[in-house]
Amino acid sequence: MTPVALIDSGVANIGSMRAALEREGAHVTVTRDWNEIARAPRVILPGVGAAAAAMRELDALGLSTRLPTLKQPVLGVCLGMQLLFSTSDEGGQTRCLGLFDGTIRRLEASAAARVPHMGWNALQILREHPLIAGLDERSYAYFVHSFAAPVSELTLASCQHGQPFCAIVARGNFMAAQFHPERSSAVGARLIRNFLAMS
Amino acid sequence: MTTTQLTRRLIPCLDVRDGKVVKGVRFRDHVVMGDILDLAMRYRDAGADELVFYDITASPEGRSVDRTWVERVARAIDIPFCVAGGIRSITDAREVLFAGADKISVNTPALERPALIRELSDEFGAQCVVVGIDSKRIDSEWRVNRYTGDPNKTQQLSIRTLDWVRQAQELGAGEIVLNCMNVDGERRGYDLEQLKAVRAICEVPLIASGGAGAPEHFANAFALADVDGALAASVFHSGEVEIPALKLYLLDRGHAIRPPEPAHA
């Protein structure tokens, strides 16, 4: 049973993420307490909602300066992934946590690529990493978002919706997925298992 | 076959009444189909891309959705699901979302007070906010109905469906589910004419609902009306159309579909 601190940032859909972690055998503590977060072997920053509101919440909790100092594996999910980048265009210019370089931008809508990007889409694997062991180009994940991160040399897997964007990213102990692993069936379960098993 | 684009969703709809899944024809004569959790797990295993639960008696009875089963479903399944029924405020929506639903769908309460769509969208993001529309053709115009869960209370409004679709988008709806009441439950195919008309003005994801009876109906809705997803109830509940076979049928015809997953360990 891997202990996991699931950060309760106030706007997140915590319940389904918690259940997904527990299905993979994790012992989950939903918390906003820095000491609990700091000592957990795994940390997850989930998120549903808007970037500016989420950053305000992290600021108020005293977490926005502390989270970047974590040394254990940290996984950002959906908005939680976007918060790990430098800035977000959502809600004007929102300063984020700065673990990954780049600006979160709104997906460009067209008749062929409607926004929000909502549904199952294929992953394109760009580089190998323990987090994505077992995933390949036949892996489909469930996305729900209007903003996205750019593809960069940190990108593990990209996805295509009108334009390519970053679906999974990693740098050192910080990792993130734009899609919802807790709602991506076997593909999501594999990513969570990989994250929990990481040394 | 691998597609590098967003796939079209197949969405079983579970109408919930008194804690059981029910289905009627043309919104009447509901019969019990089974337990919520049993059916949810069955559809998840079959490869459903999403589930929708309609608490069909919530709005007519003036109450919000019963959250205990939302929590049970959220813990058990690992595909997205949407909950509808009597959500009239941010507080109602927050409870359902925090119980584990991925999206909420509003229908009658949004007609009573359209500003609700804006409030929900601002609070939770457009991607959480689905607007369900029950639409019926009367005198050569598609018009919106409400309180459709209870035939004795169903009201035909003067609002034109196309106007309401436009307004809902302006207010921040992230997805539209268009239920075509004229064909609902008859299994003769989706109302392609109406879906095409709505698709032409709908910039957010559009889900077809009502009338599915055979695999070609799904193919037609995707190919001819360009809908993002197709919702169906009785044809799935009865086993007449099995989702894995339907997916293979659609993949064979070149549709962007998430392939059925191998059996789970």
Image: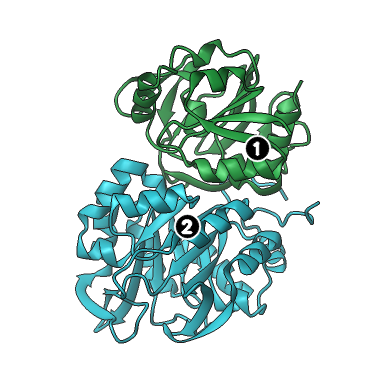
Chain colours: A green, B cyan
Packing grade of label 1 (10 A; few <14, some 14-19, many >=20) is many
Q: Give amino acid for label 2.
A: Cys
Residue B259: percent from the left, percent from the top?
70, 54
Number of numbered tags placed on the structure image: 2
Residue at the (67%, 29%) spot, across then down: A3
On what subunit does the disc labeled 1 rest?
A
Q: Can residue B128 be seen in this view?
A: yes
Q: In this view, does A67 lie above or below B254?
A: above
**Are discs 2 and 1 both within one chain?**
no
Callout 2 crowding tier (Cα within 10 Å): few <14, some 14–19, many ≥20 = many
Q: Where is residue A5 in the image (x, y as percent from the top left)?
A: 58, 28
Per the image, the residue denoted by label 2 is: B82
Q: Identify the secondary structure beneath mark 1.
A: loop
User: On the image, numbered disc 1 is attached to which residue?
Assistant: A123
Give the foreground label among 2 and 1. Answer: 2
User: Which residue is at 41% across, 27% downward?
Assistant: A105
Q: What element carries label 2?
A: strand
Which three-letter amino acid code belongs to the residue tagged 1?
Leu
Q: Quadrant of residue A147?
A: top left
Separation of marks 2 and 1 at Cα, in angstroms? 24 Å
Q: Which residue is drawn at 67% across and 22% down?
A: A41
Residue located 24% across and 84% down the image: B139
Residue B153 vs A124, above or below: the answer is below
In the image, is B34 to the left or to the right of B18?
right
Residue B7, horizontal then vertical, whole percent:
58, 51
Chain letter belonging to callout 2: B
